[in-house]
């Protein structure tokens, strides 16, 4: 409703979630898509600022937040008609939140932020307590000139971060909640037009692919 633009969308079963923003309002909406030709809004909640990207795991939505000291917001979506803010990761020193990936059991969030000359851009957060997300000690990495736009985790605990500038496609190894570059000459790729989003799959025949959206 209203003049707000949509920033991100995610669908689980017959429930969709969309973040919207205009000058005055930043919201997360849940909507019923059981009738694809006539989706209906179920509920909404105000966000601390603009929700750029999100994912939904279990009963919670995890939203990367920009233009705010809050970098990630967690929302209880167990009742789509009564969405509730649950917890947030706040860090005044970091750049805008850009994307977040959450593991299947909801214990870790992998957050990327916009480029910074003084702070890292890739973070591992402990979200086992959704009311109080915390940064994992040692769970940070500087993408070295890349301005991140997307992150995903693939089998084998490899993380892929994509963005603009520097090496726009970077692969990392996650070991005991620490991040290190993947020891492979093809792990960092230079894609000058920039990469805006990524989704990766592992097929049943063990072939792995990344799908990327470039500038």
Image (spheres, grey):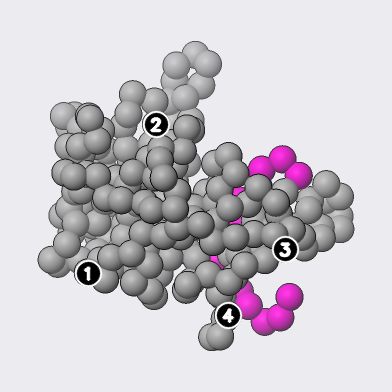
Q: Is residue 197 above or below residue 13?
A: below
Residues tagged 1 and 4 counted as in contact (Cβ below 8 A):
no
Q: Secondary structure at mark 1?
A: loop
Q: CA distance from mark 3 to mark 4?
A: 15 Å
Residue 13 belongs to magenta span = yes
Q: Which mark is residue 43?
A: 3
Mark 2, residues whose alpha carbon is within 10 Å: few (<14), some, or many (≥20)? some
Left or right: 151, with 78 as reference point = left
The disc placed on residue 154 is 2
Q: Which residue is mark 4?
A: 25
Task: Using a 10 Å C-alpha cutoff, classify the residue at mark 4 as few (fewer than 14 neighbours), some (14 to 19) or many (20 or more).
Answer: some
Q: Position of residue 15 (x, y in %)?
A: 72, 49
Quarter of the image where one finds residue 124 = top left
Q: Calculate the distance from the C-alpha at mark 1 to the C-alpha at mark 2.
A: 29 Å
If the image is split into quadrants, where does the N terminus sit? bottom right
Residue 59: within the magenta? Answer: no
Q: Is residue 73 left or right of residue 77?
A: left
The magenta span reads 1-14
Q: Secondary structure at mark 3?
A: strand
Callout in the foreground (3, 4) = 3
Q: Are marks 3 and 2 in contact (CB under 8 Å)?
A: no
Q: Residue furthest left?
A: 118
Task: Choose mark 1 or mark 2, whichever is in front.
Answer: 1
Report x, y in % for residue 207: 44, 20
Which residue is identified by label 1?
A: 93
- Which x, y percent locates residue 9? 60, 56
- Neighbour tally class for label 1: few under 14, some 14-19, many 20 plus, Cα within 10 Å: few
Name the residue rendered at 43%, 65% in the picture: 65
Q: Please report whichever mark, 3 or 2, sits nearer to the chain's N-terminal start.
A: 3
Q: Quadrant of the C terminus?
A: bottom left
């Amino acid at each position: 409703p209203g003049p707000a633009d949509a920033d991100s969308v995610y669908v689980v079963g017959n429930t969709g979630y969309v973040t919207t923003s205009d000058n005055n309002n930043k919201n997360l909406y849940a909507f019923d898509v059981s009738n694809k030709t006539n989706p209906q809004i179920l509920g909404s909640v105000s966000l601390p600022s603009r929700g750029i990207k999100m994912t939904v795991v279990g009963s919670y939505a995890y939203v990367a937040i920009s233009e705010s000291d809050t970098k990630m917001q967690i929302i209880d979506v167990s009742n789509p008609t009564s969405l509730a803010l649950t917890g947030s990761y706040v860090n005044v020193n970091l750049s805008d939140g850009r994307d977040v990936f959450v593991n299947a059991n909801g214990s870790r969030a992998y957050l990327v932020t916009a480029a910074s000359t003084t702070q890292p851009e890739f973070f591992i957060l402990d979200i086992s307590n959704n009311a109080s997300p915390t940064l994992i000690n040692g769970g940070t990495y500087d993408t070295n000139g890349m301005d991140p736009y997307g992150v995903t985790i693939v089998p084998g605990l490899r993380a892929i971060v994509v963005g603009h500038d520097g090496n726009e496609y970077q692969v990392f190894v996650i070991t005991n909640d620490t991040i290190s570059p993947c020891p492979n000459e093809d792990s960092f790729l230079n894609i000058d037009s920039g990469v805006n989003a990524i989704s990766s799959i592992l097929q049943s025949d063990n072939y792995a692919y990344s799908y990327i959206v470039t500038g």
